[in-house]
Amino acid sequence: MDAPALILRIASRRDLGGVDALLARSYPKLLKADYPPSVMVTAVPLLARARPALLASGRYYVAEAPGEGIVGAGGWSFWSRQEGVAEVRHVAVDPPHTRRGVGRRLLETVLAEARRAGMTRVVCLATRTAVPFYEAVGFLAVAPVEIALAPGIGFEAMRMVRPL
């Protein structure tokens, strides 16, 4: 099924509440099958928060469906470890809109904008759930990583990479 009529735009700090609501709807439901209950209770609430600085960066995008508000979001930032490398950040799609092209359209925008900014490669930390999505758009799995979210709270993800 094709993506609904979407409005894709650069996010701003005014979108904080809408992105927070999207992440709160998306992450718990979509990650539930791939992570144990302990992770869902401890780590997911820490992940499912919009990052104000990211929203204000000019490199984060929201997808709005007419009459529904924000149904997808995602962006990129400069990866601090290597020049010319971008990092995909906080991509999420509202569960009723998954497998309808929303995520792919957002990611295509993110990749195109990173390329336009001179980036030559992109990395991401994908949830277990998102690995097949990223592989389908040309990312290669590099290694599993444990993200420390707070003392004693970690989250397993997969480091992935793709040339631009």
Image (cartoon, rainbow, N blue to C red):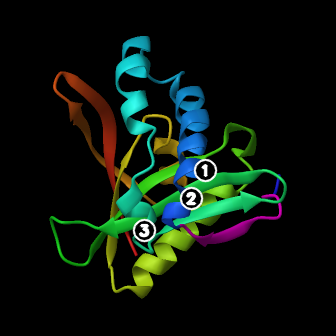
Q: Which mark is residue 18?
A: 1
Confirm or deny contact between disc 2 and disc 3 (CB under 8 A).
no
| Image: magenta residue range | 3-11
- Residue closest to the far front: 14
Q: Which mark is residue 15?
A: 2
Residue at left 83%, top 52%?
A: 1
Observer-nearest residue: 108 or 6?
A: 6
**Callout 1 amino acid:** Gly
The image shows residue 53 at horizontal and vertical percentages of 36, 62
The image shows residue 69 at horizontal and vertical percentages of 73, 54
Residue at left 33%, top 38%?
A: 157
What separation in Å lies between label 2 and label 1 (alpha carbons)? 5 Å
Question: Which of disc 3 and disc 2 is earlier in sequence?
Answer: 2
Question: Which of disc 3 and disc 1 is earlier in sequence?
Answer: 1
Crowd class of label 1 (few under 14; some 14 to 19; many from 20; radius 10 Å): some
Observer-nearest residue: 96 or 126?
A: 96
129 lies above or below 17: above
Image-quadrant location for residue 15:
bottom right
Secondary element under disc 1, as helix, strand or loop, is: helix
The image shows residue 89 at horizontal and vertical percentages of 40, 56
The image shows residue 112 at horizontal and vertical percentages of 50, 78
Which residue position holds label 3?
Answer: 56
62 lies above or below 127: below
What separation in Å lies between label 1 and label 3 (alpha carbons)? 14 Å
The answer to whether residue 17 is magenta is no
What separation in Å lies between label 2 and label 3 (alpha carbons)? 9 Å
130 lies above or below 45: below
Residue at left 75%, top 39%?
A: 96
Residue at left 21%, top 34%?
A: 148
